[in-house]
Amino acid sequence: MYLKPICWNSMEQSVTFLKPSLVRSQLATEIIGRRIIYFRNIDSTNTCALEMAARGVPEGTVVIADEQTRGKGRLGRHWRSPPGKGIYLSIVLRPRIKVEFLAYFSIISALAVAETVEGLSPFPPDIKWPNDILLHHRKVAGVLVELGTENDLVSYLIVGIGLNLLQKEEDFPSELRGKATSILIEGGKVFCREEVVVKLLQNFDHWYKVLLTSGATPIMQRWRDYSHHWIGKEVKVVTPEGEFFGISEGIGDDGRFLVRKGDGELKEVWAADIVSLQEVNK
């Protein structure tokens, strides 16, 4: 479903605060958004959601903010979160799964965001493994999954989502220009943030229920629709143990990234940064 912009070709918009009551009134989900906790300003929605999950808030609780001062990205990076410009939220899940199934939650999160972006952009999004959402090879959204465990089981999961919606080029620091983008930059349209949040949460609710009821197969099929362009590309894989080069063979059914090294060895990667050498050499 494509959302209708509230104005066209507008680079001038004032900061408006999110209205959680409007989100609640429009939301049609079974699990996600049972409780919505809103802040105008917070250090990190993920940090807050982790603390609340440890205290027992119910599954489906959503923490959302207009601004984050210490927003979290993958691998310890900072997620820039200027006030009123994006969607910054975290979802509490309690799936009671084994840790080895954790990768699927990054995948359903990326799917939910990609489908939301697809309804906002004139251009189709790409998913860069594991859960970066790109428009024109620039990052428009990202996902961070954090967890609490008990006896080798996941007792709760926090899915943090950041989506750049209304940022202009000058809203990004110089080191991110050309690497990060927003829905406004790519399409010149301004969307109601409440409607975007509703669509995002409904997409997430759908894929979470698919995972719980039907397993990973339909999820992996849909994920590959957004990431097939990575297959056959020469990539650099940066892991905590070091880096190596190879040809991408996509992802396995367990969510691991598959890379064929020059010596023929197939590497299955759980956690890494993937860099397309074609994009680097342009």
Image: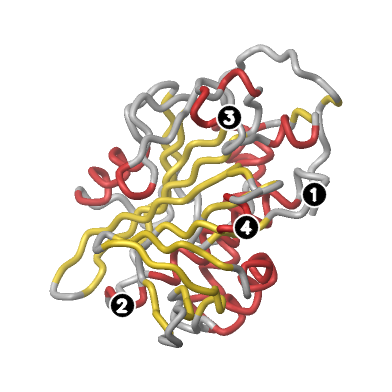
* Circle nearer the N terminus (4, 1): 1
Disc 4 designates what residue? 278
State which mark lies toward you, 1 or 3.
Answer: 3
The image position of residue 71, as x and y in percent, is 38, 34
* Circle nearer the N terminus (3, 2): 2
The image position of residue 223, as x and y in percent, is 61, 70
The image position of residue 187, as x and y in percent, is 79, 35
* Circle nearer the N terminus (4, 3): 3
Q: CA distance from mark 2 to mark 1?
A: 34 Å
Q: CA distance from mark 3 to mark 2?
A: 36 Å
Instruction: Give me the disc on residue 100.
Output: 2
Instruction: Give me the disc on residue 123.
Output: 1
Q: CA distance from mark 1 to mark 3?
A: 19 Å
Q: CA distance from mark 4 to mark 1?
A: 20 Å
Disc 3 designates what residue? 177
Determine the secondary structure under disc 3: loop
* Circle nearer the N terminus (1, 3): 1
Q: Position of 243 compared to 219: left or right?
A: left
Q: Position of 213 compared to 91: left or right?
A: right
